[in-house]
Amino acid sequence: MWTTLLFACLPQAAQAPFVDDSEALGDVRTTCGTRAKDYIIEVNGGGLALCDFDRDGDLDLLVVDGSTLERVKAEQPGLPTRLFLNDGAGRFTPAPEGWAMTPGRWGMGCAVGDVDGDGWLDVYVTHWGTDKLYLNRNGAGFLDASARWSLSGQRWGTSAAFLDYDRDGRLDLYVANYLAFDPATISPPGGGCAWKGFPVMCGPEGLTPLHDQLLLNVGIASETQPGFRDVTAGAKVRPEEAGFALGVTTLDYDLDGDVDIYVANDSTPNFLWENQGDGTFKEVGLARGVAYDMNGKEQAGMGVAVGDVNGDGREDLFVTNFSGENNVLYASKGERGFVERSGPTGLAGPSIVKLGWGTALEDFDLDGDLDTFVLNGHVYPQADNPGTDTTYAQEAQFYRNDGAGRFRAEPLLAGGQLVLRASSVGDIDGDGDVDIVAIELDGRVRVLRNTLKRDGERKLNWLAVRLTAPDGNRFALGGRVVVEWEGGSRAREIRTSGGYQSAIEPLAHFGLGAATRARRVRASWPSGETLEVLDVPANQTLVLERPKAK
């Protein structure tokens, strides 16, 4: 009771920070089984990506769709992943036929990266079934290269992340896998699985988790040489006990120059895979304080975000969790790991009665510090029954940073509760602030436009930094940017992974508050080159090309 009362007493914004502008996309919907949710395969929803696939300078929208068990039983393919092109003002239209993607069995999430090093962003889509790789044909459409790149096997992939873990200039891939699912052997509601006294779908507990995969990009040199080679065992990313993996992201948590991997697991301890620099990893989640909550209990991790919350130059981790648990902020202590700061920062209490999914750490109000949001929605429609202390549809939350490291919870949107899942973020309309696109389970894909730039008479400024390279890892995934301005500084790594089953553009975005210039921009590439730029005007996207090695 005290939690509810405390939340009710928090000050509310006069206007919701985001407005639903879904008409900018039209009535685009996705499918994930039936509304009854009799089986666990029907509750995850699909993923999203906001990236510039046609290289015209604005963010396009990729939407991963699902299927139904009826289609699966009839041996019909699932519903296709779709691309919507941006007109430059934040309005989307279906891409031409050349961008069509052949569907798999049941689409789940996506990862984005330039896998073949040609300067165009490609797409990897996870499935319940065989995953798909779509190569970008120089802006003329997608090519299904799944077989050519040796993708095979029937799994249940969720999130995925591109990274260059061995720093050879080619993007490798980490695939988070969930569980072994066969509807013929899993009981529907009423078959023995219950939640708060109500019969519900079964899982994940009681089912078999699947091991994640690490795929090494070896390129294609001949007809017999695969593009990806599974190095999971050889790279030592196969623990004795697998987790129910849902969220994954990359970060250099110890600042040693190579990329580490963080995995949010459902009902099992989270993983932190520390890159050893020799082609192998070591699981250090428990030792570094990110496997459990502060009480030493595993939680049901869903989405994950990374960002320098307190401005100390180290990126922190934020994880969304199941209802009855709280969302968790792990504050970085550098190479020593992390310490949980959920309670003192105000991120814990308002989340306990919610079930969180998509999220991000961004400076949404451009005041110089990072804010966050959480998309909420239960997995059990039975949550609407009396006595559950929660609901199926739930209010999405916006957590505004007060500048001193405390977050104030308020509704993300005005007017109602939704069953939301995946999200992607980016400046879709070119006005300098970060917007959100979200998937409503069994509903619309929603465009949520940022209104926070309207801050009375105060002009709020921003700077975006993009790192490029003439060859190899052309979008500099794993690179690092530090921006200093009058009043603050922040560090960001370049990545396309994060959130829940979704991808973001390879760009570092910074709010500068009232500052009209950045005093210093320091950039480093995964290959080791560095560059420093002084006195950079605000309100632009600064593109920095990798300098030539000396």
Image: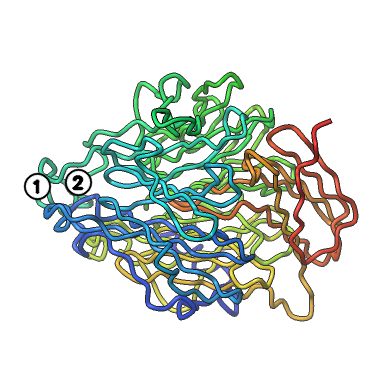
Question: Disc 1 or 2, which lies upstream in sequence?
Answer: 1
Q: Which residue is mark 2?
A: 202
Q: Which residue is mark 1?
A: 191
Closer-to-camera residue (77/261): 77
Q: Label 1 amino acid?
A: Gly
Where is residue 416 drawn, in percent x and y?
41, 76
Quadrant (top left, top right, bottom left, bottom right) of the N terminus: bottom left
Q: What residue do we see at 68% from left, 53% from top?
A: 508
Q: Count neighbours of disc 1 (C-alpha within 10 A) and say few if under 14, some if 14 to 19, many if 20 or more.
A: few
Indicate the quadrant where residue 333 lies: top right
Indicate the quadrant where residue 366 lies: bottom right
Closer-to-camera residue (309/402): 309
In this picture, is 181 found above or below 384? above
Closer-to-camera residue (137/59): 137
Q: What residue do we see at 57% from left, 43% from top?
A: 317
Q: Is residue 312 left or right of residue 201?
A: right
- Can residue 474 be seen at all in this image of the molecule? yes
Indicate the quadrant where residue 101 lies: bottom left
| Disc 1 to disc 2: CB gap under 8 Å | yes
Task: Kindly report the distance in space between the C-alpha atoms of the residues bearing marks 1 and 2.
Answer: 8 Å
In this picture, is 174 found above or below 458? above
How many numbered marks appear?
A: 2
Q: Circle 2 sits in a helix, a strand or a loop, which is it?
A: loop
Where is residue 429 drawn, in percent x and y?
61, 73
Quadrant (top left, top right, bottom left, bottom right) of the C terminus: top right
Q: Circle 1 sits in a helix, a strand or a loop, which is it?
A: loop
In this picture, is 14 found above or below 86? below
Where is residue 81 drawn, in percent x and y?
37, 59
Q: Label 2 amino acid?
A: Cys
